[in-house]
Amino acid sequence: ETPYFKVARVKWPGGEDSGVLAPGMSVHCLVKFAPDSLKDFEDRLVVVSEEGEVHIALTGKRDPPILDLPSLLDVGACLLGGVIQKTFRVTNTGGPGAFRMLNVCDKEVPEHLITYQEVKTDAFVVGPARFSLDTNEAMDVHVTFKPEEGQPS
């Protein structure tokens, strides 16, 4: 029913291209899964017999990415007008994935409208805002803290 699953080959008993199955016999079907994104997919295979239809659920999933980035990036204390830069190593221990960091106010903005390379808030700059990591691949996330007078704390 979807373009992501295709019956690529059906192997009937005796090597024929088609046929009738007697009780106890089997047919082997090769189903190919060809997704166009990293999301999970569902479909169904319909087998037709004299007695009606049998529906077989198909799912195509991938291992979800798992980042070891801590929920709090503590850069330490900094005097007003000073600057602290700190690097945090992030590793993806799950399946491959693409990631983006967002400013809280951009949470509902469609992805194609977000073009910034770094996330900027009152006193912080975090980047890169977009990145991809394969399984067991790591990269650095850079945080700059520059508190200035008049910014919320």
Image (cartoon, grey):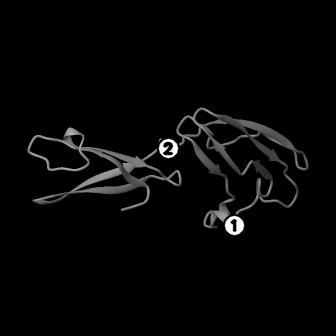
Residue 25's quadrant in the figure?
top left
* Residue 36 x/y as whole percent: 52, 55
* Residue 111 x/y as whole percent: 64, 63
Near mark 2 (Cα within 10 A), the count class, few <14, some 14-19 or many ≥20, is: some
Q: CA distance from mark 1 to mark 2?
A: 25 Å
Label 2's element? loop
Label 1's element? helix
Near mark 1 (Cα within 10 A), the count class, few <14, some 14-19 or many ≥20, is: few
- Looking at the image, residue 37 sits to the left or right of residue 86; the answer is left
Q: Is residue 78 above or below residue 123?
A: above
State the count of labels. Answer: 2
Q: Earlier in the sequence, mark 1 or mark 2?
A: 2
Quadrant in which the C terminus is drawn: bottom right
- Looking at the image, residue 90 sits to the left or right of residue 35; the answer is right
Provide the residue designation for mark 1.
113
Point 69% across, 59% down: residue: 103
Point 88% across, 57% down: residue: 149
Marks 1 & 2, CB-CB < 8 Å contact: no
Residue 15's quadrant in the figure?
top left
Q: Is residue 81 above or below residue 13?
A: below
* Residue 90 x/y as whole percent: 66, 37
Amino acid type indicated by mark 2:
Pro
Spot the residue most to the right.
81
Provide the residue designation for mark 2.
64
Q: Is residue 139 above or below residue 147?
A: above
- Looking at the image, residue 29 sits to the left or right of residue 87; the answer is left
Point 87% across, 55% down: residue: 148
Spot the residue most to the top.
136
Quadrant in which the N terminus is drawn: bottom left
- Looking at the image, residue 20 sits to the left or right of residue 55; the answer is left
* Residue 47 x/y as whole percent: 22, 55
Amino acid type indicated by mark 1:
Leu
